[in-house]
Image: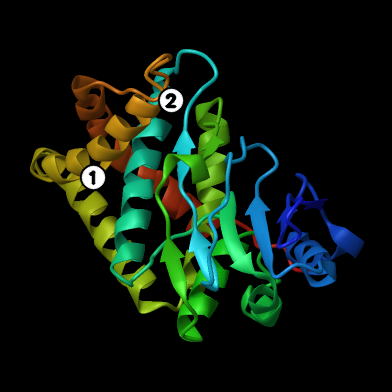
Amino acid sequence: MKQLPHNTITTVIPRRGINDEGKGKKYALYQLISSAETEYVHLLDDDVVPPSQLPDTTADMVILPLRMETENSPTLVERLQIAEYAAIQELTIRTARQGHAVMCSGANLLVKRQRWVESYHDLHPEIASGDDMFLLESFKRRGLTIVVVDQHEYTAIVRPQPTLHALLRQRMRWAGKAPAYTDKDIRRCGSIVFLALLLQLICPLFILLNFPIEYKLAHSRLQQWATLNAAHTKSKIRFLTILLLSFVYPLYAVVSLLGGLFSHRRPTY
């Protein structure tokens, strides 16, 4: 834990492999957060570049933006992730603004400390990951205040997975917790996405029909990232590249989802 100078926020960065007392990451987070003495905790992943500032707020949860970029010229696998992450970020921001948040990320999240502690038993300690999404569900169920900010000074930078194997493992881990979701907005959004992916696999024509929606969702976020990172253009993905990736994406996404649902083992602690 790093105590920030103004003593109102504690930044919590769980290290990879954290397994406090053999009870898993969520218990370790509970130990850290419950022992903090500040009103808010700022959740970060250990492999992100943190934001330069944090917003003043009275909300129970503030969903903060993320930007994916590489340190060098991105490979095709990294371009796939950048395009996907741009769409995910746009969906995260838009749904939260409409009061129907379907995603948040513990890679950059500002939360009232006491509210997090009160939600601990809703985080499914028996499931190894997903503390951020289960936290979102708990906050929505309890009627707590959830806001989103989208200014670049509050943006953390995340890195893509370096290989296809690492990417699939990560996505399968994410997918493995999907059956435990209970929030109607999250379940509805997931069902629509899965149905769209299946239709695209069954009939590639649906890829072309769906492409304008996907391109619009990702393009506005990619444009914003390219503007912020114009000197390096590491987040810039061209139109033809996105179109090519659209034909690969349904297979990759369905394999990740089904692999996570049927082969992912949930450790218990």
Dot label at residue 159: none
Residue 119 in view (yes/no): yes
Quarter of the image holding residue 244?
top left
Residue at numbered disc 2: 77
Eye-nearest disc, 2 or 1? 1
Q: Nearer the viewer, residue 196 or 94?
A: 94
Q: What SS does tag 2 mark? A: helix
Residue to which mark 1 is pinned:
217
Q: Is 68 located above or below residue 62 in the figure?
A: above
* Colour option used: rainbow
Determine crowd level at label 2: few under 14, some 14-19, many 20+ residues with C-alpha closer than 10 A. some
The image quarter containing residue 258 is bottom left
Looking at the image, residue 235 sits to the left or right of residue 191; the answer is: right
Q: Position of residue 53 (x, y in %)?
A: 58, 45
Q: Residue 255, image x and y in percent?
A: 41, 45
The C terminus: image quadrant: bottom right
Side of 226 relative to 202 (left or right) = right
Residue 124 placement, left or right of 156: right
- At label 2, the amino acid type is Val
Q: Looking at the image, which residue is at 65% across and 62% down?
A: 266
Question: Which residue is farthest right?
Answer: 21
Instruction: Residue type at mark 1: give it.
Output: Leu
Separation of marks 2 and 1 at Cα, in angstroms: 20 Å
Residue 42 locus on image (x, y percent): 65, 56
- How crowded pointer 1 is (Cα within 10 Å; few <14, some 14-19, many 20+) is rated as many
In the displayed structure, would residue 269 be above or below residue 159? below
Viewer-proximal residue, 85 or 179?
A: 85
Residue 149 occupies which quadrant of the picture?
A: bottom left
